[in-house]
Image (tube, rainbow, N blue to C red):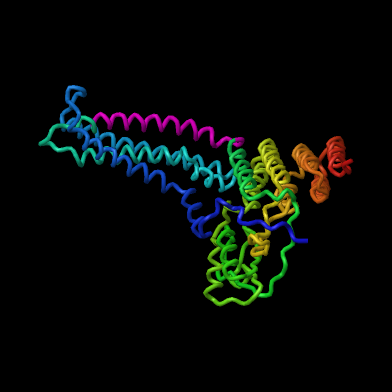
Amino acid sequence: MQGKTSRAPFAWLRKRAWVLAWLMRFREGFAFLPLVLGVAGGGLATLLFALDPWVPTSLLVAPPVEAARTVSSTLVGAVLGVAATTFTIVMAVLTLASSQFGPRLLRQFLKDGVSQATLGIFLAVASYHLAVLALLDPSDRPGVLPVWGGLVVAAAGGVALVVFVQHFARSVHADVIVARVGTDFEALVADLCGTDTCESPVPPELPVRLPAGTAGYLQSVDLVALQRLAGAHDLEVRVVPRPGAHLLPSEPLLQVDRPVDEALASELRECASIGDDRSPTQDLEFVLAQLAEMAVRAMSPGINDPFTAELCIHRMTQGLATFVDRGAPPSVFGDDDGKVRVWMRWPTFDELLGAATHRLRPAAGRDAGTLLTMLRALARLSNTTPEPSVHASCARYAREVRASAGPDIPTGDLARLDAALADVTRLRT
């Protein structure tokens, strides 16, 4: 049975997939906001020099030109030195933290708006005073507005430093990191999902295969462009891998219902973005796996932090409950007349639950408390919906969790695990 057709529900997905992937990488870097603020700092100095002749000298004290030059040159060196020292210490702390939580912590830091704004303010202060040094004219009157404005800008840099240190000290806490990743997963579920069912229709096999042409991970698919292109050429297209899958150049990326020329095949391929790493743009499993990775690292013998693992389990449960509540992402996209144009494959609830538990079960096998938390989380998920498929998945993974209990767990704890397993496998009435 085919699912209900959907007509381009991804209103936020308007550009080509490779543009979206580039924008995602740009957002997660330090480039855009710091550069904009740096340019704005120099522009502000130029603007204040232009407005300065209209400011009466009786309103503000005009310092000597040499004094203004000394202040500006001193502030440039001081701000750049503080910025270099601050971010060197930050990277050292992040290196230590990433060994505990995983290298994806760096991704969270790089896209953090406060960190980007702080670096941008430092660059703005430096570029402002460099512009002041370049525009001060010894033969003219001192720039009253630029000099006093420079003091205000320097004070803003000091405030930004204090705010950043407080923000960064909090952002490396385990609960904050886990909450950020969990929020990312829930936001992605909210963007993608909305079919009111956790079951997706099985896409048909189409006769013509279009190979990927390049190796890498499928980062995203521009379903709007793909649907329009398929409609314009009266095609039915199936996206073979789901986002996050690794492809070889010869493996099929798309299937179509009839042969197409190379030009059209190239246009169809351009609707998919393939890169060297996985991206959180449409990859539900990737974002969920970040929480699972932090939980696995927390349960490693070298760290042995079951409390962080429980935090990760709670956030994975919360995100999966959101998935169950909203249903799987739309898999069928059609024209106004109902003709199917695009088939898309997404991970099922069972696959997401497997991504959340497969690697964590062996790591948690020696800790009864973590196993008990996993079983109780599965019971809570099972109770969120009447769907039999969700109940069956929760019960199956609950049995696997119970079977992973190590031989050193006391008998009393094993009895509690058995009781929690019974809560999951008990049929709902």
Q: Is residue 170 magenta?
A: yes
Camera-nearest residue between 178 and 199: 199
Determine the main secondary structure of the stretch shown in magenta.
Answer: helix
Residue occupying the far left of the picture: 139
Q: Quadrant of residue 123?
A: top left
Examine the rendered structure and indicate whether residue 2 appears above or below residue 391: below
Percent x, y of residue 283: 62, 54
Quick check: can you spot residue 380?
yes
Percent x, y of residue 367: 76, 40
Percent x, y of residue 122: 36, 38
> In the rendered view, does 19 fall on the left or right side of 241?
left
The residue located at (45%, 34%) in the rendering is 164
Q: Quadrant of residue 295?
A: top right
Examine the rendered structure and indicate whether residue 250 appears above or below residue 422: below
Q: Is residue 362 magenta?
A: no
> In the rendered view, does 111 fall on the left or right side of 184?
left
Camera-nearest residue between 342 and 407: 342
Examine the rendered structure and indicate whether residue 408 appears above or below residue 23: above
Camera-nearest residue between 374 and 340: 340
Q: Quadrant of residue 34?
A: top left
Residue range corresponding to the magenta coloring: 147-175
